[in-house]
């Protein structure tokens, strides 16, 4: 009987582990809600080291918080802004490493600029859509901007600066008029 119990434990362990590894993307909810639509189809959210799902969790949580921080002050009481990210391309490109380390490396050059494609929808206190649009932001000058100094220790410094700059400079008129 004991051998049977150990055998069942061995057989069921991979199944239990697979069940606990189910991906759950961070939820950014509140006045500014960020939805990550079909993240498996994004151009580049590849981890250069570690587990892919943990890297994606970090990326989505960090960028979602940046959207919230940059856009929440623009909303009136009761309003809600929904950001639906449809594509993401992180700065740089992941290449295989042929050295002693098994990890890939992310090469950051001006030919690999960061890009985020999303739609936004502004809703009033009743939940009616007031305005919305599709947006594609891309920072072709990301290496030369002031982002290097202000976000130097952040692994997503170019992407967070791009969101911050969009909120400060390129925000669509219906939202910019609220400043």
Image (spheres, rainbow, N blue to C red):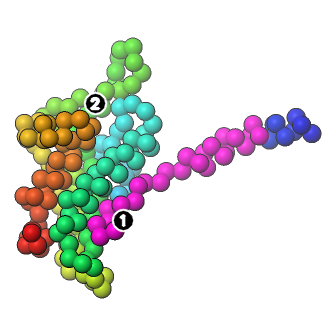
Q: Residue at x 31, y 82 (%)?
A: 127
Task: Give yes or no for residue 162 being in the magenta stretch.
Answer: no
Q: Nearer the viewer, mark 1 or mark 2?
A: 1
The residue tagged with tag 2: helix, strand or loop? strand
Residue holding disc 1? 29
Categorize mark 2 by other alpha carbons within 10 Å: few (<14), some (14-19), many (20+). Answer: some
Does 113 sit above or below residue 83?
A: above
| Quarter of the image that includes the C terminus | bottom left
Res. 48 image quadrant: top left
Q: Start and end of the magenta stretch? A: 9-35
Q: Quadrant of residue 10?
A: top right
State the separation of the CA atoms marked 1 and 2. Answer: 31 Å
Mark nearer the N terminus (1 vs 2): 1
Q: Is residue 14 magenta?
A: yes
Of the pair 53 and 169, the residue shown nearer to us: 169
Relative horizontal placement of residue 165, taking residue 54 as reference (left or right): left
Residue at 42 percent across and 21 percent down: it is 102
């Amino acid at each position: 009987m004991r051998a049977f119990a150990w055998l069942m434990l061995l057989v069921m362990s991979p199944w239990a582990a697979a069940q606990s590894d189910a991906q759950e993307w961070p939820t950014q909810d509140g006045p500014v809600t960020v939805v990550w639509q079909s993240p498996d189809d994004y151009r580049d959210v590849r981890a250069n080291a570690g587990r892919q799902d943990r890297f994606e969790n970090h990326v989505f949580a960090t960028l979602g918080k940046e959207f919230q921080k940059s856009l929440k002050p623009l909303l009136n009481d009761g309003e809600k802004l929904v950001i639906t990210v449809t594509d993401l391309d992180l700065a740089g490109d992941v290449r295989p490493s042929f050295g002693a380390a098994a990890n890939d490396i992310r090469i950051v050059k001006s030919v690999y600029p960061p890009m985020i494609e999303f739609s936004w929808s502004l809703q009033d206190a009743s939940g009616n859509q007031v305005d919305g649009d599709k947006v594609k932001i891309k920072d072709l000058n990301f290496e030369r901007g002031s982002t290097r100094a202000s976000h130097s220790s952040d692994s997503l410094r170019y992407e967070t600066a791009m969101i911050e700059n969009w909120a400060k400079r390129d925000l669509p008129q219906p939202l910019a008029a609220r400043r």
